Image: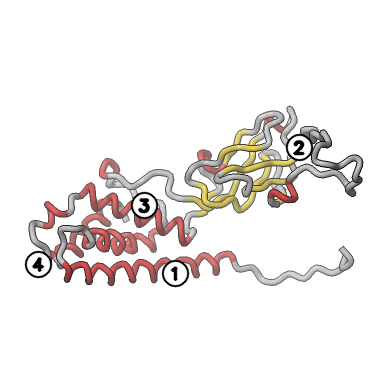
Amino acid sequence: MQVSEILEHTREELDDKSDLIAGAPDDLWSDELLVRFLSQGEQRLARFAWVLVDDTSPACCEVALSADQATYNLHKSVLRVLSARLSDTDIDLTRTDHYFIRPYVGVPEPELFQPSYQYTEPSSRPRLYSTDNAVRVIRFRPAPNADAAALSALLRVVRLPLKPLSLDQVDCCPEVPEEYHLELVDWAVYRALMLPNVDTQARQTAKDYRDRFEASLREAKRDRWRQEYAPPQFVFGGWAN
């Protein structure tokens, strides 16, 4: 559905409640305000239900590497990096965390591996990545050398919408899947009916819309879990490791 269609549907829902409001609905709820609420609903749906998974948008799915630089900022829309690979291969890098991606050498020797021991890991082709070093930062190990710096890191991410919904683009569609477009109406109506100049009875009605939106979030989460479900795989051998 286009933004204009979703906005019209939101207006229809609010017009049904107009007898509970002191004042004209158009004065209380401008199109700009309602689109802002619709955009907020889309943000919440993407943030809490992870319905936007992307591996093609360059802004959030491609990181240009630089020689000897291990850490890079992620796009502000990225919620989680699901996988990463270098642009010259289909094989994913290994995901890890700060504990395992930090430099360490062999078995500790008291005279060699104190914190004062000077050690710098040479740059090479990255094999590992982590995203828990800072908010929206990805770290590679080893840091790319000159050859690897000619490549990019290609990411598969869970993200927020890249742009908020706007009256300037009412012919466009929200980024969340179409089956969730009407859920945005529930959030927008809830926010509209909770404004200070709306009476108490309408605010009670608003909670029904909020509850319906929250129920849709839970269902969207379940849809996401079902999409990620994979049958169990059995690996034989190597038990000692």
Between the C-alphas of marks 3 and 1, the distance is 20 Å
Judged left or right of residue 224, residue 127 is right
Secondary-structure class at tag 1: helix
Number of numbered discs visible in the structure rendering = 4
Residue to which mark 3 is pinned: 174
Q: Amino acid type of disc 4?
A: Asp
Between the C-alphas of marks 2 and 1, the distance is 41 Å
Tag 4–tag 1 contact (CB < 8 Å):
no
Judged left or right of residue 95, residue 21 is left
Tag 2–tag 1 contact (CB < 8 Å):
no
Q: Earlier in the sequence, mark 4 or mark 1?
A: 4
Between the C-alphas of marks 4 and 1, the distance is 32 Å
For label 1, the crowd category at 10 Å Cα-Cα, with few meaning under 14, some 14 to 19 and many 20 or more, is some
Secondary-structure class at tag 3: loop
Judged left or right of residue 103, residue 139 is left
Q: Quadrant of the C terminus?
A: bottom right
- Seen at 71% across and 47% down, the residue is 93
Between the C-alphas of marks 2 and 4, the distance is 66 Å
Q: Earlier in the sequence, mark 3 or mark 4?
A: 4
Q: Amino acid type of disc 2?
A: Arg
Residue 97 percent location from the top left of the image: 69, 51
Question: Which quarter of the picture shows residue 227?
Answer: bottom right
Residue to which mark 2 is pinned: 125
Residue to which mark 4 is pinned: 19
